[in-house]
Amino acid sequence: MKLLDLLLLFITLASCLQLLVYRRDKAHYKPALSVIAYLIIVSYGGLSVALLTGMLSSTQIPALVIVGIFVLSSSVFYCAGNVSMILKLPRRIQHVINFR
């Protein structure tokens, strides 16, 4: 197992855990966002299991996909698991760039 495999394993498992323990407090339940969170959890969990069992290696994953995994994982940590906030990030970034 290479260092990138271990890093991907840690990032995907940590992102799954962050999404699983998200508490919405006073926010309203939105089924579509729950489906998106579920799909992220299942895909990251499957990737981590494949990396852990040796069925998949980081050399078999395209570099652009690895970059996408790191970007999505960093946004999950930045938004503390709030999928609604993750989907609003591009608008917030654009607002900061166009600040006058």
Image (cartoon, rainbow, N blue to C red):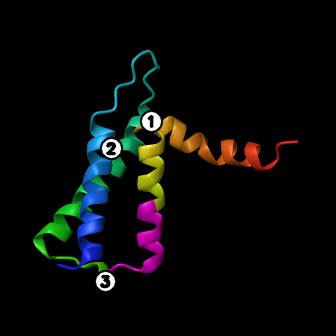
Q: Residue at x 31, y 41 (%)?
A: 18
x then y, percent, for residue 17: 26, 43
Q: CA distance from mark 1 to mark 3?
A: 30 Å
Position of the C terminus, as image quadrant, is top right
Stretch in magenta: 61-70
Residue occupied by mark 3: 60
Q: Is residue 22 above or below residue 24?
A: below
Q: Residue at x 40, y 39 (%)?
A: 81
Q: Is residue 90 left or right of residue 60?
A: right
Q: Is residue 68 left or right of residue 9?
A: right
Residue placed furthest toward the right = 100
Residue 38: image tag: 2
The type of residue carrying mark 3 is Gln
Q: CA distance from mark 1 to mark 2?
A: 12 Å
Residues 31 and 77: in front is 77
Q: Residue at x 30, y 75 (%)?
A: 4
Q: Earlier in the sequence, mark 3 or mark 2?
A: 2
The type of residue carrying mark 1 is Asn
- Asked where in the image residue 3 lies, by quadrant, the reply is bottom left
- Asked where in the image residue 34 lies, by quadrant, the reply is top left
Q: Secondary structure at mark 1?
A: loop
Residue 49: image tag: none
The type of residue carrying mark 2 is Tyr
Residue placed furthest toward the bottom = 59
Residue 82: image tag: 1
Q: Earlier in the sequence, mark 1 or mark 3?
A: 3
The question of residue 63 being in magenta is answered with yes
Query: CB atoms at circles 3 and 2 under 8 Å apart?
Result: no
Q: Earlier in the sequence, mark 1 or mark 2?
A: 2
